[in-house]
Amino acid sequence: VYLCFYSAQYKFSLQQDLQMWVNGANENGFVLVSFGAGVKYLSEDIANKLAHALARLPQRVIWRFSGNKPRNLGNNTKLIEWLPQNDLLGHSNIKAFLSHGGLNSIFETMYHGVPVVGIPLFGDHYDTMTRVQAKGMGILLNWKTVTESELYEALVKVINDPSYRQRAQRLSEIHKDQPGHPVNRTVYWINYILRHNGAQHLRAAVYSISLYQYFLLDVAFVILV
């Protein structure tokens, strides 16, 4: 059963200081930067690259950041240890999202139709951002080799090239076109499985085959013989 957007919400409420910051952005809007709760601190080298690239943008920047303040932080950048990511992604002034490519972050980004620049750090981030780039709603960068100029150019591209936002908004329309809220569907299917004693009729046949069938050893034997 396909479920997504379980954390995305229709209503957006921001604290007064954040509301003033994003509302005060001119026609250039703002860029959101977050590498997720799993990344507490960035290395000094990466943080300085990010700070310098972000300082060159005409947009305001809201950056979820912990640790020592980067030495070349721009006046356009606001550092904050925690932020309401979903609410900021849903704001009308947002222009782009700089992210690690975590699945939940990408679901929220897709829900609101925001273009992405992704710097995968570990785990499924690489796979998720590869799919985002293939769909045309973002650009993937390698954190081991990315330069300040490459980061700046990628952000400028997704902000100024309308095709990235158009594709993100198209994906948003497709994924929003579902029966009911994901949480309600989750509750329904959990109860469905409980009502039908595990719902064995929904289990794939692969769970009941033998190991030699699973690894196609019988097919290999026939071919070799």
Image: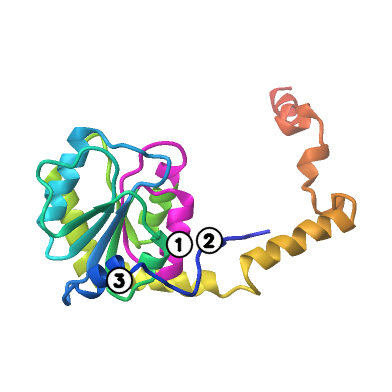
Q: As rendered, which of 215 and 93 lies closer to the eye?
A: 93
- Where residue 94 appears, as percent x and y from the top left, is 29, 69
Q: Residue at x 81, y 59 (%)?
A: 191
Instruction: Point out the residue furthest to the top here.
Output: 225
- Can you tell which of label 2 and label 3 is closer to the viewer? 3
Instruction: Point out the residue furthest to the front here.
Output: 16
- Can you tell which of label 1 and label 2 is closer to the viewer? 2
Does the rendering let one see residue 146? no
The residue pinned by badge 3 equals 19
Characterize the local packing of mark 3: few (<14), some (14-19) or many (20 or more) Cα atoms within 10 angstroms.
few
Horizontal relation, residue 91 to residue 200: left or right: left
Horizontal relation, residue 1 to residue 7: left or right: right
Which of the 4 image quarters holds residue 95?
Answer: bottom left
Badge 2 marks a residue whose secondary structure is loop
How is the structure coloured here?
Answer: rainbow
Residue type for callout 3: Gln
Q: Quadrant of the N terminus?
A: bottom right
Residue type for callout 2: Ser
- Tell me whether the residue at label 1 lies in contact with that at label 2, contact meaning CB atoms closer than 8 angstroms: yes
Q: Residue at x 11, y 53 (%)?
A: 74
- Residue segment shown in magenta: 100-127
The residue pinned by badge 1 equals 108
- First in sequence: mark 1 vs mark 2: 2
Horizontal relation, residue 107 to residue 193: left or right: left
- Where residue 120 appears, as percent x and y from the top left, is 35, 42
- Where residue 53 appears, as percent x and y from the top left, is 14, 50
164 magenta-colored: no
- Tell me whether the residue at label 2 lies in contact with that at label 3, contact meaning CB atoms closer than 8 angstroms: no
